[in-house]
Image: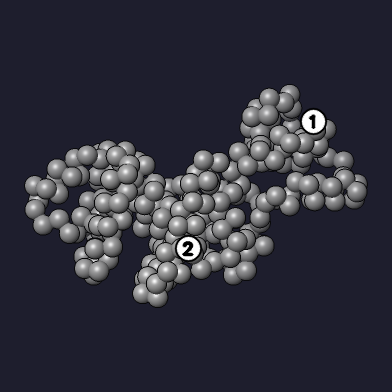
């Protein structure tokens, strides 16, 4: 079983199974993970410290068919990229930083220092520092991408006043652009790293992005370029936890 699955999805699947199956599967998960899931299921369970008895082939096949088939492993993906290699926790951070970076790019279009300072004052101190850092480091941003970032930030700011939610929604949109040309298996692998709420949100964003992608040839070219940029940023984030 792939290690990069948000426990909430395992809980959702196991909650439909009888207690005997729940216990059997928990016994074969990493101890820390099995304890957390048992708590969610309100199940009295303690991981075994002694070597486990081998599971007979019939039961193993049942587990594969009824449990493991609900999830995707990295090995199931044809030509995985760096986004696929992000862990559950790093994916969440990556999305946040995508939002921060996009806001920084949009800030390139603010000519007045006073206006920029007032805008940045609306964010948490840590986020403001990151935005300023990105703003300082990204000197060669083409005006086209500034316009694109400004539109994305404005659209999300108008519908969501909470800065944290704005960063999240921008990040999820950019992530969706990186997946718009990828298959269902790739999307499912990333989706199972999210919380239930976030996976539903990203699914909606993916559908909207797909419609935009097929609606216009110029938009398709722009999204393809942007998707490749997000992939490169993921590779950098894995190395440095920054974009």
* Residue 51 placement, left or right of 236: right
Q: Residue at x 25, y 57 (%)?
A: 150
The answer, for residue 175, to whether it is visible in the render is: no
Q: Residue at x 79, y 30 (%)?
A: 19
Residue 83's mark?
A: none
Q: Position of residue 98 (x, y in %)?
A: 37, 54
How crowded pointer 2 is (Cα within 10 Å; few <14, some 14-19, many 20+) is rated as some
* Residue 31 placement, left or right of 235: right
Q: Which residue is mark 2?
A: 210
The answer, for residue 149, to whether it is visible in the render is: yes
* Residue 29 placement, left or right of 153: right
Q: Which residue is mark 1?
A: 19
Q: Residue at x 66, y 56 (%)?
A: 73
Q: Earlier in the sequence, mark 2 or mark 1?
A: 1
Q: Position of residue 74 (x, y in %)?
A: 63, 59
| Quadrant of res 148 | bottom left
Q: Position of residue 33 (x, y in %)?
A: 65, 38
Q: Is residue 226 above or below residue 6?
A: below
């Amino acid at each position: 079983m792939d290690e990069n699955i948000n426990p909430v999805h395992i809980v959702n699947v196991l909650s439909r199974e009888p207690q005997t199956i729940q216990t059997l599967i928990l016994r074969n998960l990493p101890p820390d993970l099995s304890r957390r899931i048992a708590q969610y299921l309100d199940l009295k369970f303690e991981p075994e410290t002694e070597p486990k008895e081998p599971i007979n082939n019939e039961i193993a096949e049942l587990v594969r068919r009824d449990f493991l088939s609900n999830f995707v492993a990295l090995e199931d993906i044809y030509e995985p990229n760096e986004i696929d290699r992000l862990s559950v926790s790093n994916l969440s951070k990556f999305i946040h930083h995508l939002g921060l970076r996009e806001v920084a790019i949009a800030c390139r279009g603010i000519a007045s220092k006073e206006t920029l300072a007032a805008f940045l004052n609306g964010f948490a101190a840590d986020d403001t520092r990151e935005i300023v850092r990105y703003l300082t480091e990204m000197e060669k941003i083409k005006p086209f991408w500034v316009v694109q970032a400004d539109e994305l930030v404005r659209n999300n700011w108008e519908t969501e006043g909470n800065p944290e939610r704005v960063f999240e929604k921008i990040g999820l949109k950019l992530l969706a652009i990186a997946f718009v040309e990828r298959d269902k298996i790739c999307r499912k692998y990333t989706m199972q790293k999210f919380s239930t709420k976030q996976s539903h949100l990203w699914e909606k964003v993916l559908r909207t992005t797909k419609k935009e992608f097929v609606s216009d040839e110029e938009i398709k070219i722009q999204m393809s370029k942007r998707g490749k940029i997000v992939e490169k940023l993921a590779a950098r984030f894995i190395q440095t936890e920054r974009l």
